[in-house]
Image (spheres, grey):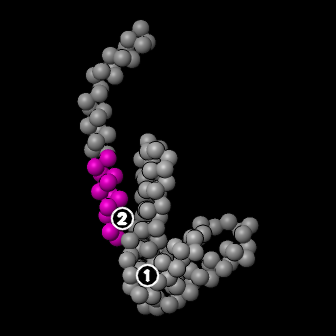
Amino acid sequence: MALIAHETAHVRQGDLRTRAIIEAFLVFAAPLVAERIRTSWLQASERLCDARAADVTGEPASVASAMVSLCRLHVSRPASSFGFTPTADELASRVHAVLEGGPTGERAAVLLGRSALVTSVLLVGAAIVAAEPLHHAFETLLG
């Protein structure tokens, strides 16, 4: 039940759509920055889904147990590729957050959203400011 509640939370949050949008923006980011943003969003998303699964099931311990069980399964069958591969520190942090009602990742998600909005506005502004000089540069270059 915990796994289904967690995955349902991903669907309700629209995580696939959000991930696609983030990946589209990250095409223009520096590789290290892109990886940091991607990791921050993934961790925030997972924590939010963990918290929602704990709320839905009413059993935070079963959510934590499911996370540990999935990690054990991945270690015992590394050939079976699936998306749940947190580091030991990430797993411990998520389990602790679920059991103790710790940070859910909402703050990180809001910060990432605001950063994306500001970046979008700056990119649009830069495109508007540079449109005329770029137009002339391409005309000159192409003859």
The answer to whether 75 is drawn above or below residue 101 in the figure is: above
Q: Is residue 114 magenta?
A: yes
Overall secondary structure of the magenta section: helix
- Estimate how packed mark 2 is, as few (under 14), some (14 to 19) or many (20 or more) residues with alpha carbons within 10 Å: some
**Residue ID at (30%, 33%):** 127
The location of residue 48, given as percent across then percent down, is 41, 74
Q: Nearer the viewer, mark 1 or mark 2?
A: 1
The location of residue 62, given as percent across then percent down, is 52, 89
The answer to whether 136 is drawn above or below residue 15 in the figure is: above
Residue under label 2, please give it: 109
The location of residue 38, given as percent across then percent down, is 47, 57
Relative to residue 90, is residue 112 drawn left or right? left
Query: Hey, which quadrant is residue 17 in on the image?
Result: bottom left
The location of residue 99, given as percent across then percent down, is 45, 88
Q: Secondary structure at mark 1?
A: helix
The answer to whether 125 is drawn above or below residue 33 in the figure is: above
Q: Secondary structure at mark 2?
A: helix
- Going from N to C along the chain, the mark reached first, 1 or 2, is 1
- Estimate how packed mark 1 is, as few (under 14), some (14 to 19) or many (20 or more) residues with alpha carbons within 10 Å: some
As shown in the figure, which amino acid type bears the numbered disc 1? Ala
**Residue ID at (26%, 31%):** 128
Relative to residue 81, is residue 130 drawn left or right? left
The answer to whether 16 is drawn above or below residue 130 in the figure is: below
Between marks 1 and 2, how big is the CA–CA gap? 16 Å
Q: Is residue 137 magenta?
A: no
Q: Which mark is residue 97?
A: 1
As shown in the figure, which amino acid type bears the numbered disc 2? Ala
**Residue ID at (45%, 48%):** 26
Q: Is residue 57 visible?
A: no
**Residue ID at (28%, 49%):** 118
The span shown in magenta is 106-119
